[in-house]
Every structure is written in C-alpha cells, then in structure tokens.
Image: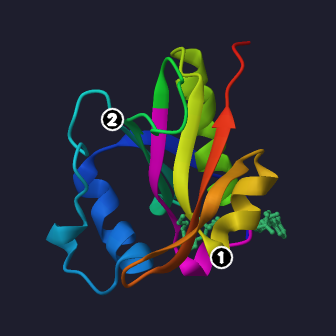
Amino acid sequence: MSLQYEIKRITTAQTLPLRQKVLKPFLPVAECINPGDDLATTYHFGLFHGGKLVSISTFLLESHPAFSAGFPYRLRGMATDDKYRGQGFGQKVLSHGVEFLRSQGCDFIWCNARLKAFNFYATLGFRFHGPMFELKDIGPHKVMYKHLIRR
Ligand SMILES: CC(C)(COP(=O)(O)OP(=O)(O)OC[C@H]1O[C@@H](n2cnc3c(N)ncnc32)[C@H](O)[C@@H]1OP(=O)(O)O)[C@@H](O)C(=O)NCCC(=O)NCCS
C-alpha cells in the first residue's frame, strides 16, 4: 500500500467514529467525547489515506500533577484503524501534532499509555513515569511523557 497521506486538523465529531471503534468499542459513540474536546485550545489531527481517515490524535491543554511544565499538553485518543496499522501512520500523525505544539511553545506532552502502545510511544521518545495502573474496561497503563525543546 502506498504511503501517500495528508494530515489535517479535524473536529471532535470527525474523531468519534474511529475513537469509538478502536479505543472504546464498549461505549456508544456519543460517550466517547472527552472533557475539553471542543475547547479552542484543543487540537485534533487526522491522517487521511486515499481520502479515508485512518489515524487520529487529540491534544488537550492540561498539566500533569507530577510535572511543572510551563505549557503542557495531554495526548488522548491516539488510534489507527486496525486495517492500516504498522505502516507508520500513527507515528506520522503523532509527530505532526508534537511538532505543531512545539511550534506554539508547548514544552511538555504526556499521556496515559496503554501497555500495548508502550513501544509505539517509546519509539517516538516518550519516557515512563510512575507505576502501572489499571483503567476500567481498558487494562494496564503507565504515564508516558516527553519534554519538548524549542527549536
Ligand atoms: C498504537 C497505535 C495508535 C499505533 O498506530 P500505527 O499506525 O500502527 O503506528 P505505526 O505504524 O506508526 O507504528 C506501529 C509499529 O509499526 C512499526 N512500523 C512503522 N512503519 C512501519 C513499516 N513501514 N513497516 C513495518 N513496521 C512499521 C513501528 O516501528 C511501530 O512499532 P513499535 O510499536 O514496536 O514501535 C495503534 O496500534 C492503535 O490504534 N492501537 C489500538 C489503540 C491504542 O492502543 N492506542 C493507544 C492508546 S494509549
């Protein structure tokens, strides 16, 4: 499959079908909305392949209590359609968001990472913080984070 793709800022509504299908299949679509999704400071990015939305990520202006960053963002809703995984689309949409936020002055990004996604985030330079914890209906997680250095 060709790696032709386009990454765009998308709306909360555009993220929901893929978010529900990949991350929260146990919830109806309407309940996959997260607090802050529609704030002006929130960014949803989508990677389109052949016009189809195949990978998404959301960044919310939110600090983590263990870190004293000046301009922190939380990554949520990172998902790639299962038919399109392992082709670099997730890395591309996440890196796009990270570089965009860096350009805005963001100095820190964190997320609650699922065990199965540890390698994915580590490959992109995220590090672990604290112990493993369990999120209901989903499974084991760890906080992962990345300091951004201004370029
Ligand atoms: C985690 C997730 C978003 C990754 O999306 P993806 O599009 O498959 O990500 P990529 O293709 O960029 O990278 C996935 C792996 O494929 C590898 N890869 C990337 N391009 C590749 C290529 N052309 N050929 C072979 N492997 C490749 C990457 O090295 C990566 O390996 P790693 O995880 O061991 O680092 C996806 O697996 C997913 O949606 N999982 C379910 C939901 C989930 O767990 N989300 C995270 C919540 S915290």
- Which residue is found at the position 25% from the left and 67% from the top? 32
Mark 2 CB lies closer than 8 A to ligand 1: no
Number of marks in the rendered image: 2
- Which residue is found at the position 59% from the left and 48% from the top? 93
Mark 1 CB lies closer than 8 A to ligand 1: yes
Amino acid type of the residue that numbered disc 1 sits on in the rendered structure: Lys
Query: Looking at the image, can residue 151 be seen?
Result: yes
- Which residue is found at the position 72% from the left and 19% from the top? 149
Look at the picture and state if 90 lies above or below 85.
above
Q: On the picture, is 143 further left or further right than 71?
A: right
Mark 1 falls on what kind of element?
Answer: helix
Q: On the picture, is 119 further left or further right than 59?
A: right
Picture disc at residue 116? 1
Amino acid type of the residue that numbered disc 2 sits on in the rendered structure: Thr
Mark 2 falls on what kind of element?
Answer: loop
Disc 2 packing (10 Å; few <14; some 14–19; many ≥20): some
What residue is shown with label 2? Answer: 42
Look at the picture and state if 104 lies above or below 148.
above
Of the pair 96 and 6, the residue shown nearer to us? 96
Q: CA distance from mark 1 to mark 2?
A: 25 Å
Ligand 1: give its quadrant.
bottom right
Query: Looking at the image, can residue 2 be seen?
Result: no
Mark sitting earlier along the chain (1/2): 2
**The magenta stretch spans which residues?**
73-88
- The colour scheme is rainbow
> Was residue 78 drawn as part of the magenta stretch in this picture?
yes
Q: Whole-percent x and y of residue 104?
A: 51, 16
